[in-house]
Image: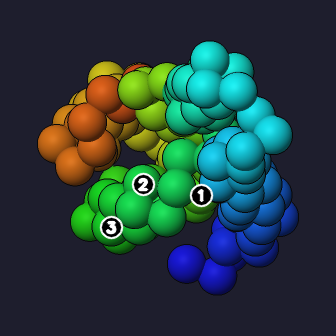
Amino acid sequence: MPHFACNRCSSDVSRLRAEKSLRDFVRNLNSPLVSTDKRDALSFLGTGLTDLLDRSAGRKVHEAIDRALLRHANDYGELARIRSRRSGRVIFIELALRFDPSLSIAQINQRIDALKQSLGHEIEHADISVLALAATR
């Protein structure tokens, strides 16, 4: 969706650069100048490092978020913000949505629960937070 795709561009480019650097690093471990023990330790570190660091949630997660938001487009007034990141196996998703001020808190919570359930079915190991904001006038 164009209203937030630009925010993802820089993080996707950074992620791709980091992944390329890591692949190059691991590929260079096969040099005869690196001992077997060091090669094994560095290879283990290089492959496990991505799971230890926070990184972009990835294109598939962003597409799943877009699909869920489209399915529930009539449940909220406006999308204010999306944040997502991956830390190990867990994908943290934060959505800030504006709701019609005439809705009760119970109605807003029902809509949020439906959206969270929809996202949870599509994205494994997701920790989903939805912030309810009043609609701007």
In the picture of the structure, the residue carrying the numbered disc 3 is 67
Corner quadrant of residue 75: bottom left
Q: Classify residue 118 as left or right of residue 46.
A: left
- Among numbered discs 1 and 2, the one appearing first in the sequence: 2
| Position in image of residue 32 (x %, y %) | 73, 45
In the picture of the structure, the residue carrying the numbered disc 2 is 61
Corner quadrant of residue 68: bottom left
| Position in image of residue 133 (x %, y %) | 63, 37
Q: How far apart are marks 1 and 2 (CA)?
A: 17 Å
- The relative height of residue 116 versus residue 105 in the rendered view (above or below) is below
Q: Classify residue 70 as left or right of residue 58.
A: left
Colouring: rainbow
Looking at the rendered structure, the number of numbered marks drawn on it comes to 3
Q: Which of the two residues, 120 or 106, is positioned nearer the viewer here?
A: 120
Amino acid type at image mark 3: Arg
Q: From the image, which quarter does the C terminus lie in?
A: bottom right
| Position in image of residue 130 (x %, y %) | 49, 32
Amino acid type at image mark 1: Leu
- Estimate how packed mark 3 is, as few (under 14), some (14 to 19) or many (20 or more) residues with alpha carbons within 10 Å: some
Q: From the image, which quarter does the N terminus lie in?
A: bottom right
Asked if marks 3 and 1 touch (Cβ < 8 Å), the reply is no
Mark number, residue 79: 1
- The relative height of residue 109 versus residue 15 in the rendered view (above or below) is above
Q: Nearer the viewer's eye, disc 1 or disc 2?
A: 2
